[in-house]
Image (tube, rainbow, N blue to C red):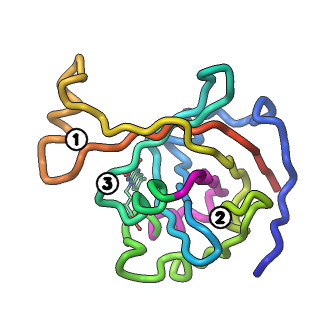
Amino acid sequence: MKNFNFLQIDPLSIKDNLIKLISADWMLVTAGNKKKINTMTANWGGMGYLWNRPVVFVFVRPERYTYQFTERSESFTLSFFNEEYRPTLNICGSKSGRDCDKISEASLTPVFTELGNPTFKEAKLVIECRKLYSELLAKDAFIDMEPVAAHYSGQAGIHKLYIAEIKKVWIK
Ligand SMILES: Cc1cc2nc3c(=O)[nH]c(=O)nc-3n(C[C@H](O)[C@H](O)[C@H](O)COP(=O)(O)O)c2cc1C
């Protein structure tokens, strides 16, 4: 098992523009334990402040294999990478861990934080989060129906929202 070789920083010291970081650079949502982990690429979500603590929020469709891991785990990580890892993020966003060992195919090296949460040696920024709240989005709660028509009218399931407390932030 590779060593966890990151430096901890305060969440307030994250320098990146978070909208760009999530929407354009993308992230891996990773959960599991030392026996089994899974990861998937995501670019919907955010970070902010809620219930007097720094939080992230992410959206995972129930048909993702990763969903089984985010459901079962108390915590998950968000991992961010330099541009050279775009092919890695494309693999993790197009293949399912249900069908293949995509972590190996994507040349990622799993490492575990001291709290036991999985991330990857290759990441440049890791946000370690503990779940606070989760709920499937409700179609009848939409005020503007455009996103429902665009994203929830076909076969694909409606996303589950996870709001999670930021426990630790790690950089290289
Ligand atoms: C750029 C990008 C962003 C994505 N964002 C999300 C997302 O926010 N939520 C989600 O459920 N799936 C998202 N996906 C799709 C999953 O990454 C994809 O279905 C993946 O293969 C799931 O893998 P898994 O079955 O191993 O969990 C995204 C894919 C890409 C390429």
Residue 141 locus on image (x, y percent): 24, 22
**SS class, disc 2:** strand
User: In the image, what residue type sits under mark 1?
Assistant: His
User: In the image, what residue type sits under mark 3?
Assistant: Pro
User: Label 3 belongs to which residue?
Assistant: 62
User: Label 1 belongs to which residue?
Assistant: 151
Q: Earlier in the sequence, mark 2 or mark 3?
A: 3
Q: Residue at x 35, y 80 (%)?
A: 99
Q: Please give the range of residues in magenta.
A: 73-91
View quadrant of ligand 1: bottom left
Residue 125 locus on image (x, y percent): 72, 51
Indicate the quadrant where residue 88 lies.
bottom right
Measured Cα–Cα span from mark 2 to mark 3: 20 Å
Q: Is residue 119 above or below residue 22?
A: below
Q: Is residue 2 above or below residue 130?
A: below
Residue 90 locus on image (x, y percent): 45, 65
Q: Earlier in the sequence, mark 1 or mark 2?
A: 2
Q: Residues within 10 Å of mark 3 (few under 14, many from 20)?
A: some
Indicate the quadrant where residue 142 lies.
top left
Measured Cα–Cα span from mark 1 to mark 2: 30 Å
Q: Residue at x 36, y 43 (%)?
A: 160
User: Label 2 belongs to which residue?
Assistant: 118
Instruction: Tell whether 13 sits left or right of 126.
Output: right
Q: Is residue 10 magenta?
A: no
Which quadrant is home to the N terminus? bottom right
**SS class, disc 1:** helix
